[in-house]
Each structure stands twice: as structure tokens, then as C-alpha cells.
Image (cartoon, rainbow, N blue to C red):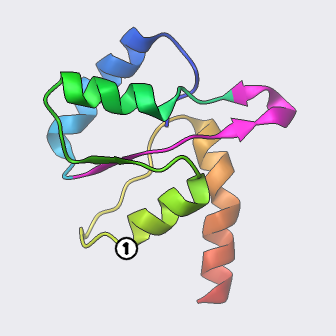
Amino acid sequence: SFIRTNQGKVRDNLEVLLPIVSHLIATDFNLEATERYSTDPLNVVKICDALGYEDWELVRQPAKALQQLLQREEQVLLITGSFFLISAVHPLIIKLKDTT
């Protein structure tokens, strides 16, 4: 997920990221207290398509996106985007850690 910004920056970031990932999960975040919102994940996957990258999924809820990520078989799992996304999923990761 990317903070709401110009689409050129999202495309530039995806051009760097996509060659090194085997799968991408585009998600959303909304931190109303800070008035920070993500780029619409539908726009992210549209850019993926435009760049010829097809191994993506769109999961709007960060908690569900994290669950989907943790089900992946890759040895390295990466959460990337803005620090706002990290702050949105951090409590979920702590909660998972406390239950395992």
C-alpha cells in the first residue's frame, strides 16, 4: 500500500519492486486520526497490469491482507509501502505473535 500521492511515484516504486517479488498483495489503509489515506489499491493493480505484472491480488482490508501474506509459501515475506501501512498492521502482527 502506498500513501495517497501522485500516481507517477507509485508507478516508479512498482517498477523497482515488481522485478524482485513473486507475488503482490495490494491493500488499503485509513488512519483517520492522522488524516492519512492510501492510494486506492485498485489503481496499484492497474499499474501492475500496465507494467505486465499479473501475479497480484487485491485485498482491501489490511488484516485480511496480512492473513493472505502469512499463507504464502515464499521464505521471505515483505510488507512494504508507507510507514502508515506499517503502523496499521503492526498491532495485528503483535496480536498474532502473542497468540502463537
Is residue 90 positioned above or below 74 on the image?
A: above
**Residue 63, how many percent across, how many down?**
60, 60
Front in this rendered view, residue 46 or 15: 46
Total numbered labels:
1
When asked about the image quadrant of residue 3, the answer is: top right
Local packing at callout 1 (Cα closer than 10 Å; few below 14, some 14-19, many 20+) is few
Residue 31 belongs to magenta span: yes
**Residue 79, how many percent across, how many down?**
44, 51
**Residue 1, how many percent across, how many down?**
49, 37
Q: What residue sits right under mark 1 in the picture? A: 71
The boundaries of the magenta stretch are 23-36
Front in this rendered view, residue 22 or 16: 22
Is residue 92 positioned above or below 12 on the image?
A: below
Is residue 50 positioned above or below 100 on the image?
A: above
- Asked whether, in this view, residue 98 is left or right of residue 16, the answer is right
Q: Residue at x 59, y 47 (%)?
A: 86
Residue 26 belongs to magenta span: yes
Is residue 75 positioned above or below 44 on the image?
A: below
Q: Residue at x 44, y 43 (%)?
A: 80
- Asked whether, in this view, residue 17 is left or right of residue 79, the answer is left
Q: Hey, what amino acid is under mark 1?
A: Gln
- Judging from the image, what secondary structure is the residue with disc 1 in? loop
- Screen quadrant of the C terminus: bottom right
**Residue 74, how many percent across, how many down?**
24, 68
Q: Residue at x 37, y 10 (%)?
A: 8
Q: Residue at x 37, y 73 (%)?
A: 71
- Asked whether, in this view, residue 67 is left or right of residue 56, the answer is right
Front in this rendered view, residue 7 or 96: 7
When asked about the image quadrant of residue 68, the answer is: bottom left
